[in-house]
Amino acid sequence: MKEEIPVSKANRLVNHGPVILVTSQFKEKTNIITLAWQMPVSHKPMLIAISIAKSHFSHDMVKGSGEFAVNVPNVNLLSQVHYCGTTSGRDIDKFARSGLTTLPAQKINPPLIAECIGHIECRLQNMYPVGDHSVFVGEVLAASVEEGLFDGCWKLDEPRAKSLHHLGGNLYTTPDNILEAD
Ligand SMILES: Cc1cc2nc3c(=O)[nH]c(=O)nc-3n(C[C@H](O)[C@H](O)[C@H](O)COP(=O)(O)O)c2cc1C
């Protein structure tokens, strides 16, 4: 079960730099792309930036539709995350092939990924060409989490809240501790 959280807390779903799965929908097609390069960039309005290579299918999907969803996978989705980051949706339906399933979004057309533990629904606010990538800045319209895993921050003591972080190639890591500063 998913519960809505305030848009003002959406940045906390990705503050710790997890790998994300971005869903997009354009011209009857739906796609999923794995991204490591993401960051919150504004509180008011709440804005999230993602960097997508110009050659990727998702680049044209997000550019064309003006919408995208950030989905936060947990460690249990390692193989699906790697699959969606090593195949192109130009040729295949990644939902069908990966076994990931759709969940309707509240405010945008692209579906969310039901198996993910966090979701941020974004409307494209701006896009910036940067080398061989484009940085897409999305305004957050809605955010939701898996019940019981978020209490203002991710409850990392819950095994299901453990995110994936990309080291490079096919290597990933997960966060271990919560440290409290004075
Ligand atoms: C862990 C991981 C992180 C990745 N991060 C990014 C990223 O931040 N930006 C990007 O453009 N591609 C990134 N990729 C590569 C794309 O996910 C990959 O090329 C994908 O097949 C493109 O799919 P598409 O053509 O369906 O859009 C990453 C791949 C992996 C496995």
Image: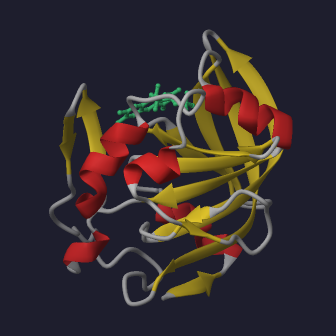
Q: Is residue 84 left or right of residue 169?
A: right
Q: Nearer the viewer, residue 98 or 153?
A: 98
User: Which percent across, then down, holds residue 58?
Assistant: 64, 33
Snapshot colouring: secondary structure
Q: Is residue 3 visible?
A: yes
Count of labels shown?
0
Question: Residue 31: where, in percent of width, then height?
Answer: 60, 44
Q: Residue furthest top?
A: 131
Residue 151: horizontal and vertical position, in percent? Answer: 43, 86
User: With 132 as the anchor, is 146 left or right in this view?
Assistant: left
Q: Is residue 127 left or right of residue 163?
A: right
Q: Is residue 153 left or right of residue 3?
A: left
Give the answer, above or below, for where 136 lies relative to 101: above
Above or below: residue 90 compared with residue 95: above
Give the residue drawn at x 47%, y 38%: 35
In this view, the residue farthest toward the left is 176
Question: Could you tell me if residue 17 is visible in this image?
Answer: no
Q: Residue 179 lies in what quarter of the image?
A: bottom left
Depth check, front residue: 81 or 42: 81
Residue at the (24%, 59%) spot, across then down = 75
Q: Residue at x 49, y 44 (%)?
A: 94
Q: Position of residue 36 (x, y in %)?
A: 43, 38
Image point 43% across, 29% down: which residue? 87
The quadrant of the picture occupied by the C terminus is: bottom left
